[in-house]
Image (cartoon, grey):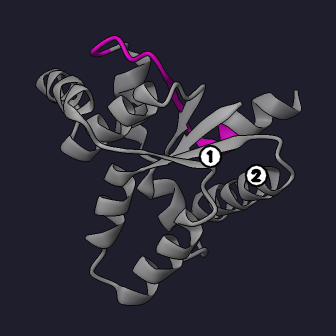
Amino acid sequence: MKIYLDACCLNRLTDDQDQQRIAEEAEAVEQILRLLRTNTIEWLSSTVLEAETSNNPDPERRREVQVLLLLATSKIPLDGQIIERAKGLEAVGYGAFDALHLSSAEAGEANVLLTTDDRFIKRAGRRAGSPRVRVVNPVEWLREQEA
């Protein structure tokens, strides 16, 4: 099983945990990282994810995510095909980084792209741009794995 975690998922670990949803999503990401350690899943990262992470204005949060990225099983390099696919995804309404994450996940043949971004999930769920990777919230994905 190959998964792609976007920046929203990774940042969830350092978000304020006072809201129940945020706390549940952070716990789900932690469980997913534990699965990684048991070789149950492969984590696909990307140069796009590194670039988005480097844009975080909070140096402590940026460092924490950069350390997590070292745990990734493999990293998908940005290339012309990914950029062209992302342009097509942007044209149907995806944000720039969402489009790049989705096209990177497709290039890496991920089984699923995990995000906490509801708009991203809804757009992909409507099949905008015919995504070849399922986009889902980490809490929902873990529930499916446990069923």
Q: Which residue is mark 2?
A: 36
**Label 2 Cα neighbours within 10 Å, binned few <14 / some 14-19 / many ≥20:** some
Q: Nearer the viewer, residue 38 or 121?
A: 38
Asked which quadrant contains residue 124, the reply is: top left
Q: Is residue 37 magenta?
A: no
Q: Is residue 129 magenta?
A: yes
Give, as a three-letter code, the residue at label 1.
Trp
Q: Are marks 1 and 2 in contact (CB under 8 Å)?
A: yes
Q: Residue at x 50, y 71 (%)?
A: 65
The relative height of residue 4 versus residue 7 in the rendered view (above or below) is above
Residue 104 horizontal/vertical position (percent): 38, 35
Asked which quadrant contains residue 30, the reply is: bottom right
Q: Answer whether residue 15 is visible to the viewer in this image.
A: no
The relative height of residue 111 versus residue 139 in the rendered view (above or below) is above
Q: Is residue 105 left or right of residue 143?
A: left
The relative height of residue 144 versus residue 32 in the rendered view (above or below) is above
Residue 43, numbered circle: 1
Asked which quadrant contains residue 21, the reply is: bottom right
Mark 1 or mark 2: whose residue is earlier in sequence: 2
In the image, the segment drawn in magenta is 128-140
Disc 2 on helix, strand or loop? helix
Q: Residue at x 31, y 74 (%)?
A: 56
Disc 1 on helix, strand or loop? strand
Give, as a three-letter code, the residue at label 2.
Leu
Residue 44 horizontal/vertical position (percent): 55, 44
Q: Residue at x 23, y 23 (%)?
A: 85
